Amino acid sequence: MRSFFRAAFIFVSAIMCILPAQANTLSQVRERGHLLCGVNTSLPGFAIQQTNGTWTGFDVDFCRAVAAAIFADSNAVNFIPLNATQRFDALQSGEIDLLSRNTTWTFSRDTKLKLNFAGTSYFDGQGFLIAKRININSALDLQGARICVQVDTTTEHNLSDFLQAQRIHYFPIRFKDAEEAIELYRRGDCDVYTADASALAATRASLATPSDHTILPEIISKEPLGPVVREGDEMWTNLVRWTLNALIVAEELNVTSKNVEMLAKTTVHRDVGRLLGTQDALGTQLGLEVDWVVAVIKSVGNYGEVFERNIGEGTPIGLARGLNDQWQKGGLLYAQPFR
């Protein structure tokens, strides 16, 4: 019996040693001096490394926003490029602190992988990219098509479910990462490329003659994409979640990178004051400075600025706001209030 209790004590002690490491992400990031953020290996508009080594993109800017929240310095982040197969292992092992990489929030990922989704940063859906010369205008006409699809993704399962339901026989051409898919599609090794519609827009923009290609009208799935963190650290989850909320609420309240410092000094609007820390000091509940949102918005802008700069209609990606517009404008962006 004594040996049983001794073994139980050792087991509980081991668990207690593990828990603080999992539940202290903010302290670890501060001690290190920078955030470790997992991003796509190369997805124009969302995450891409420029020739000078600088990372840019919608998901990249979210990493910078979290760094600004912690350090008041959006450059205090190292970007770790990860493919779809690597991304969850890298987060679970502690190789990264945050995953900001076009990752769909699903039941299984939320419950089985010991991960937390901190919100939805981009509402997407799966579609199909095809060359106009093939003369197919609907996904319902893909009988016998060779379709490029990425392995270890929700995309692969969605494709199978959709075409099986439509009794459409197809030939899947499986690949590991987006670079391989683009090359296969460019060479004509597959007739169709299926992915999130945002990724298809990015791919089309990278082709020699984007106007020779079209995205078919059918959207066959819901793909809520957003930042992911490890389970076991509620303060870190909250920090990441409320950084995303801050970007959304700032746009709703017309707080921008150009006026945020002025508003922090002059606003009499109570909602703006709570957001920017001039009232209620909400940031201290996250272990942050009271004016942490000022640093975030000054560094990267509000949600709308991040969207338009990286993937909006004025960029080569050319995406309309659509579902990713504010709730007052018919979109799905609706953040919890700062109170």
Image (tube, rainbow, N blue to C red):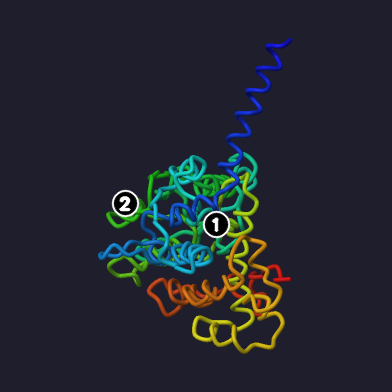
The image quarter containing residue 236 is bottom right
Asked if residue 54 is positioned above or below residue 176 in the image, the reply reads below
Q: Earlier in the sequence, mark 2 or mark 1?
A: 2
Residue 174 location (% of width, % of height)? 40, 43
Say which amino acid is labelled 2: Leu
Residue 87 location (% of width, % of height)? 46, 46
| Residue located at (26% from left, 65% from top) | 52
Which residue matches tag 1?
A: 227
Q: Is residue 269 left or right of residue 65?
A: right
Q: CA distance from mark 2 to mark 1?
A: 29 Å
Asked if residue 17 is positioned above or below residue 85 in the image, the reply reads above
Q: How many numbered marks have been drawn onto this rendered protein structure?
A: 2
Front of the two marks 2 and 1: 1
Residue 117 location (% of width, % of height)? 60, 53
Q: On residue 2, which mark appears?
A: none
Category of crowding for the residue at label 2, using alpha-carbon neighbours closer than 10 angstroms: few (below 14), some (14–19), many (at least 20): some
Q: Is residue 13 left or right of residue 175?
A: right
Which residue matches tag 2?
A: 184
Q: Nearer the viewer, residue 306 or 219?
A: 306
Say which amino acid is labelled 1: Pro
Q: For the N terminus, give its image quadrant.
A: top right
Q: Nearer the viewer, residue 251 or 320?
A: 251
Residue 105 location (% of width, % of height)? 59, 52
The image quarter containing residue 291 is bottom right
| Residue located at (60% from left, 60% from top) | 239
Category of crowding for the residue at label 1, using alpha-carbon neighbours closer than 10 angstroms: few (below 14), some (14–19), many (at least 20): many
Q: Secondary structure at mark 1?
A: loop
Query: Tags 2 and 1 in contact by the CB under 8 Å rule?
Result: no
Q: For the C terminus, give its image quadrant.
A: bottom right
Q: Nearer the viewer, residue 66 or 142?
A: 66
Q: Secondary structure at mark 2?
A: helix
